[in-house]
Image: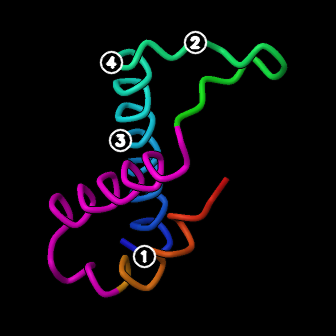
Amino acid sequence: MRDTDILAIAKALYMNRLHLLILTEVVRHGIGPDPETGNLSLPPDEERALREQAFDFLLAVFPPEYHLKLESIREKWLTLQ
């Protein structure tokens, strides 16, 4: 498998895990939609912590030989909007 394929799989797993974590927190805190945008938003520091958790999940499930490649894109993925 090519690195681009592995990164595509990693990105899909990261986004899936991140959405699961965010939705769990939205429900746990009873956050409703923003009246202007309709978005369900968490405080930025809490969202950053969830992004870190989602990325740590990748490192836990991917073989160690991919960790350097994943670490090289960590900050980029943590700051995606």
Q: Quadrant of the N terminus?
A: bottom left
Question: Is 28 contained in the magenta span?
Answer: no
For badge 2, the amino acid type reads: Gly
* Of the image marks 1 and 3, the number of the one nearer the N terminus: 1
Which of 78 and 71 lies nearest the eye of the viewer?
78
Query: In the picture provided, is 26 more to the left or to the right than 41?
Result: left
Element at label 3: helix
Mark 1 → mark 4, Cα distance in angstroms: 39 Å
Q: Is residue 31 above or below residue 69?
A: above
Dot 1 crowding, Cα within 10 Å, few <14, some 14–19, many 20+: few
Q: Which residue is mark 1?
A: 2
Q: Which residue is mark 4?
A: 28
Q: Which residue is mark 2?
A: 32
Mark 2 → mark 1, Cα distance in angstroms: 42 Å
Point out which mark residue 17 bears: 3
For badge 4, the amino acid type reads: Arg
Question: Is 59 contained in the magenta span?
Answer: yes
Q: Which residues are magenta?
A: 43-68
